[in-house]
Amino acid sequence: MIPVPPGVRVWLATGATDMRKGMNGLALQVQQALERDPHAGDLYVFRGRRADLVKILWHDGLGMSLYAKRLERGRFVWPQAKEGVVALTPATLSMLLEGIDWRQPQRTWRPEMAG
């Protein structure tokens, strides 16, 4: 898991992204299509058309980083919107990267009352 510092926002690019793009191509997509600053320190998460690969773009103040994860089985769960961006919490990002359906996570049972 990427260590997300406190205060860093996580943005999920909706729709499918061309996974042949590298740092510069994804940074340009953040700037033009999402109308955000790719150098502001936020995390931007992109998913490929087959939904088994994600790339995460992050500028930490010193340089740009590009992380990639491919699931061997299953698919990453993504919003239905065709374009735009969705804000996530770092906890939700963690679930997404583990292949968990973050839209409706199963909560553990909690007792109603003691005794």
Image (cartoon, rainbow, N blue to C red):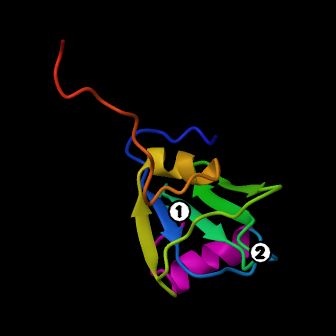
Q: Nearer the viewer, mark 2 or mark 1?
A: 2
Residue in view at x 53 percent, y 79 percent: 31
Q: Position of residue 63 (x, y in %)?
A: 65, 52
The residue that disc 1 covers is 39
Residue in view at x 83 percent, y 55 percent: 72
Q: Position of residue 90 (x, y in %)?
A: 46, 46
> Marks 1 and 2: in contact by CB < 8 Å?
no
Q: Nearer the viewer, residue 61 or 69?
A: 69
Q: Which quadrant is the N terminus positioned in?
A: top right
The residue under label 2 is which amino acid type?
Met
* Residue 33 highlighted magenta (yes or no): yes
The vertical placement of 6 against 66, above or below, is above
Q: CA distance from mark 2 to mark 1?
A: 20 Å
The vertical placement of 54 against 113, above or below, is below
Q: Dot 1, how many residues are within 10 Å of its Cα: few (below 14), some (14-19), or many (20+)?
A: some
Q: Nearer the viewer, residue 91 or 65?
A: 91
Q: Which quadrant is the C terminus positioned in?
A: top left
The vertical placement of 98 against 54, above or below, is above
The residue under label 1 is which amino acid type?
His
Is label 1 in a helix, a strand or a loop?
A: loop
* Residue 54 highlighted magenta (yes or no): no
- Per the rendered image, the range of residues in magenta is 23-39
Residue in view at x 53 percent, y 77 percent: 14
The residue that disc 2 covers is 19
Q: Earlier in the sequence, mark 2 or mark 1?
A: 2
